[in-house]
Image (cartoon, rainbow, N blue to C red):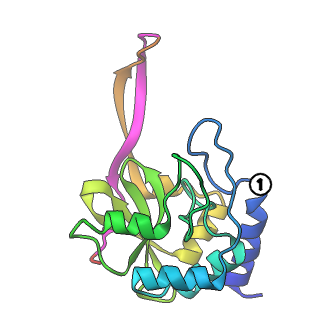
Amino acid sequence: MSGSDALIQALRARLHVEPRRPMWKGDVPRAHPVAPPEAIAQAEAKLGFELPPLARRLYAEVADGGFGPAYGIFPLASHYKGPAQRETVVEVRDKLAVDPRWPQHLLPLCDWGCANWSCLDCRTDGGAVVTLAGEQGFFDTGRDLQAWLSAWLGGTDLWGEMFEVRTRAGINPFTKQPIEIKGPGAPRGRPWPG
C-alpha cells in the first residue's frame, strides 16, 4: 500500500471519531459526502488551476471537506443551508484573493480563526502547506500535504508548529483574579516567497 493510500484509509477511519474541531458550542463535526468528479472539475475551472493529485483524492475518496486540522478542510460545494452557511473553497479563495499579495496558485485549506489560514501551494504534485498569518504574511510550514495531514492524524499540535506562544498577564473579567492569557505570537517558519 502506498503512503497516500494509507493516509486516505487513516483519514476515512478518523471521520468516524473526530473529523475536525467544533466551530461553536453545539457544533457537531461531520465530514461531507465525497465530491463527484464533476464537482472537482467545476472547482478547478473556477480556480483556474488543477488540484494536486492528493488533494483531488481527498475530495473524491475521503470527503468533500469538513475534516482535518482546525475547523476542517473547505468543501468544494456548499453543504449547509441557512444563515450559518459555510463557504466553499472557491468562495474563500475569491475573498482572500482581493489581497494583492495573494498568489494565483494558492488554495486555502482551512481556517484557524483570527485571520490565520493553512493554504496549499498547487504548483507541485506534493503541494506545500503554507501558513497565512494575517498581516504578517505567508510562511512555509516545511510540510507537503501528505506530511501535514499525517502529522495531524498523529496528534501533532499544528497550531504550535505554526506560531510561537505569546503569554501575557490579564484579569479574569468574572472573578477579577489575575490570569495568564496565551495567544499566537510570531509565526514560525521561513517567509514563503510565493
- Residue stretch rendered in magenta on the structure: 175-192
Q: Main secondary structure of the magenta part?
A: strand
Q: Position of residue 134 (x, y in %)?
A: 30, 55
193 up-or-down from 87: above or below: below
Q: Residue at x 74, y 79 (%)?
A: 6
The residue most toward the top is: 176
Q: Secondary structure at mark 1?
A: loop
Q: Is residue 177 magenta?
A: yes
Q: Residue at x 64, y 42 (%)?
A: 27
Q: Which residue is mark 1?
A: 17
The residue most toward the left is: 100
Amino acid beneath label 1: Val
Q: Is residue 60 magenta?
A: no
Lateral position of residue 191 relative to residue 172, left or right: left
Position of the N terminus by quadrant: bottom right
125 up-or-down from 32: above or below: below
